Amino acid sequence: MAVDIHKLEPTKKELLKFIHFPIDVIYKGNQYYVPDLANDMLTTFLPEENPAYEFCESAFFMAYRDGKPVGRIAGIINKLVNERTGKAEGRFGFVDFIDDEEVVDALYGAVVDWAKGKGMTQLTGPLGFTDMDPEGCLIEGFDQLSTQATIYNYPYYQKHFERLGFVKDADWVEFKIDVPKEIPEKMLKIGNIVQHRFGLHLVEKTSLKEVVGKYGESIFSLINEAYDSLFGYSPLSEKQMQHYIKEYLPFLPLDHISLVADANDQLVGVGVSVPSLSKALIKSRGRMLPFGWYHLLKGIKKEKDIVDLLLIAVKPEYQSKGVNSLFFIDLIPAFNKRGYKWAETNVELETNENVQKQWQYFNYVQHKRRRAFTKSI
């Protein structure tokens, strides 16, 4: 049967089809795939909800064969990144499909036509609207549990991207790290030196309300500074910052946030982690109703082994000076109190040696790799 491509209207009803497709079709029963919460994805996709639409535009496509869904893909243009890089680059993302050349060709044909119609000459992905969205096609680590902040896909995805003429643009790596029972001695020494040499200190936190009110804007301004030179970075706008401050910061565990400040109490570094929700999300299948909430709450209480390291950001002038040691001096006791056995890092560019050097003090393994592909169109 021929493949039919439908361009979706940006409505909740239409976008829920897009969101549920990988959960209900592609990865149904897969023990490593972690679904997104449907409500979170609606916030990402709906123009009236996502502040990134101030400088982005998008189109959503689904492929059908004999009336049944067989693939999905989003086309995105981030005008802010294009202005910064001087490129006319479209992005593809949120892509899933069955292992079928006809389906894949039809999906990519739709995105290419859309991007070229907008004047784009390059197509790169998988990428989201901004770096706050999952990015990169998994190319190593298919037998590893995914996280709520990353993409899972089957090995055949890479085969199809390369068949279509896409080539490597950037790679990210991820690590699994044992949580030590004690803070590594060398890390303690480095932390003491850093504090005295640069007049830095760990911020004492009494409540999330205090952290949000006093440091919320500083945290996201710091992320903008620290990540500015990274691959494809899209600086957060004021509206985006306020969105993340409101939607995410108040729900983080206080003992999973580490803040480093200078003598004037100005923020110079932030580390954020969360208890792993992967197993709970798998059981909920990305839905809060009718019983997804039960699986999430039960999973949060039951998960004792894994903590996800969401992000570490340090002001550029303090990078490579040992500031990262202070985060772990702060967090390792909290992790042990919670009973975590290991930590999952978020994605790190394979060229980001400064970030990867911090793992030398731990027992670790690089267990996943993912890739952004690109081609001229």
Image (tube, rainbow, N blue to C red):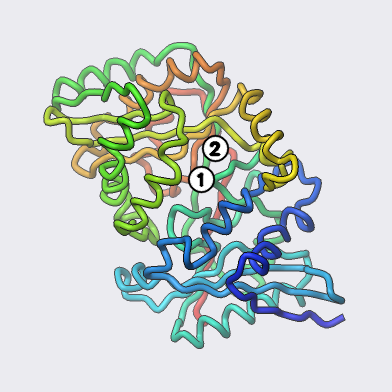
The image position of residue 318, as x and y in percent, is: 21, 37
Question: Residue 252: which quarter of the image?
Answer: top left
Residue 58 higher or lower than 255, as above or below: below
**Sequence-wise, which precedes: disc 1 or disc 2?**
1
Q: Is residue 111 above or below residue 197?
A: below
Instruction: Give the vertical position of 326 relative to 283 (above or below).
Output: above
Element type at mark 1? strand
Instruction: Judge from the rendering whether residue 322 lies leftward or rightward of residue 171; answer left or right.
Output: left
Report the amino acid beneath label 1: Val
- Confirm whether residue 62 shows in the render: yes
Give the x, y percent position of residue 377.
52, 82
SS category of the residue bearing label 2? strand
Residue 144 visible at all: no
| Tag of residue 366 | 2
Tag of residue 173: 1
Please rate how many residues cluster around mark 2, counting C-alpha atoms within 10 Å: few if below 14, some from 14 to 19, many from 20. Answer: few
